Amino acid sequence: MRRTAVLLSGVAVIGSGAVVGFMNLPGRTAAPAASPNGAQASSVPITRSDMVDTKQVSGTLGYAGRRSQPNRAGGVVTATRAEGTVVRRGGWLYKVAGKPVFLMYGAVPMYRRLGVGTTGPDVRQLELNLVKLGYKPGTVDKTFTAVTARAVWAWQRDEGLVATGRAEVSQVIFSGGSLRIAENSKQAGDAAEGSVVTTTGTERAITIKLETSHQQFARKGARVKVQLPDGKKVAGTISSVGTVARPGKDADSPATIEVRVKVGGELGRLDQAPVTVELRTGRRKDVLSVPVEALIARAGGQYGVRVVQGGARRVVPVETGLFMGSRVEISGAGLSEGVRVEVPAL
């Protein structure tokens, strides 16, 4: 498909293992004659390689799993942790009336009091946490026994809680893993009504609010390039693509889907930082290309290139394909890798 050179300003380049490095082209060779406009011309060889086209979109670098944690403790908030603090199993997230609310690991939320005679998967996960914290609740199973109660009593005593041998909904928050304090929605002295703290996981992730008209460019598992706020580029992989379109902020804003990108490398501790993500939008394998400035406009909106052979020059009509940064895919009679074409002098 033909595309005109005016489209170039919005196109970016990303590399892949199969792409030939265009920055390593053979040096330009001065041509013995001037170009038609009188300026000294030079020539470069036509190259053959894979070409990859990308689209740049905005994203936000942060942490995955942002959530306002439910609070079941009543009273006045007496302590919170510094934002950015990572809390692991057995650590406290905040304190209400001087009593800590602790983090334990598990998939079942703390939705009821656990005491002798209680059964269920939430009992098993509590017992497993007690074992990991160094206590002895007996056999790790779904039944809360007197042995479990003694282990809970010892844990409560050690942590400064009222030792009852029963685990209360106000004492524990279960999560799938360690949590990072993203924001304290309440401060010391505030009533502990509603959520006290917003947390995230510890894994870095990039979130893209992708326009639905571009969703075909986002595929789970696809590799992308991410430009960080300091200009550094790192590799990333699309980890999830949303299926629910969210309306824009107003009538003029497009609907979007949420795309998550996992990134590697050193990313610092920036949270909610703007980044640029390059999504692959097209790829052409084993094609000929030349610098865009080698194109010559012809009648009827057509293009050509001026082939340089010895001291002779001739214009060869070409079909243009993918535009990639400063280069363009071409095809035409008699064109092959290594044939030199004229370009304006630098």
Image (cartoon, rainbow, N blue to C red):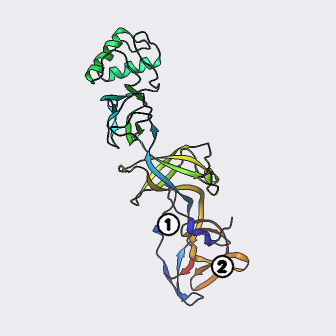
- Circle 2 packing at 10 Å, graded few (<14), some (14-19), many (20+), is few
Marks 1 and 2 sit apart, C-alpha to C-alpha, by: 24 Å
Using the image, determine if residue 189 lies above or below residue 140.
below
182 or 43: nearer the eye?
Answer: 182
* Residue 232 appears left or right of 29: left
User: At label 1, which amino acid type do we have?
Assistant: Phe
Residue at image point 33% right, 15% down = 164
Say whether residue 24 is visible: yes
Residue 251 position within the rendered picture, expressed as x and y whole percent measured from the top left: 64, 55
Which of the 4 quarters of the picture holds residue 187? top left
In the image, residue 216 above or below residue 330:
above
Residue beneath the point at 35% across and 29% down: 101
At x 37% / y 40%, what residue is drawn? Answer: 181
- Give left or right: position of 221 versus 110: right
**Which residue in the protein does label 1 denote?**
22
Front residue of this view, candidates 324 and 64: 64
> Residue 154's x, y, as percent?
28, 17
Quadrant in the picture for the N terminus: bottom right
In x, y percent, where is residue 247? 62, 49
User: Closer to the N terminus: mark 1 or mark 2?
Assistant: 1
Q: Which numbered dot is residue 178?
A: none
Relative to residue 176, is residue 38 depicted above or below?
Answer: below
- Relative to 86, is 306 above or below? below
Q: Quadrant of residue 68?
A: top left
Indicate the amino acid at tag 2.
Answer: Ala
Q: Mark 2: which secondary structure?
A: strand
Taking the spot 58% from the left edge, 69% from the top edge, the residue there is: 8
Q: Position of residue 298 (x, y in %)?
A: 69, 79
- For this view, does 268 lie left or right of residue 312? left
Is 54 placed left or right of 189 in the picture? right
* Residue at image mark 2: 297
Secondary structure at badge 1 equals helix
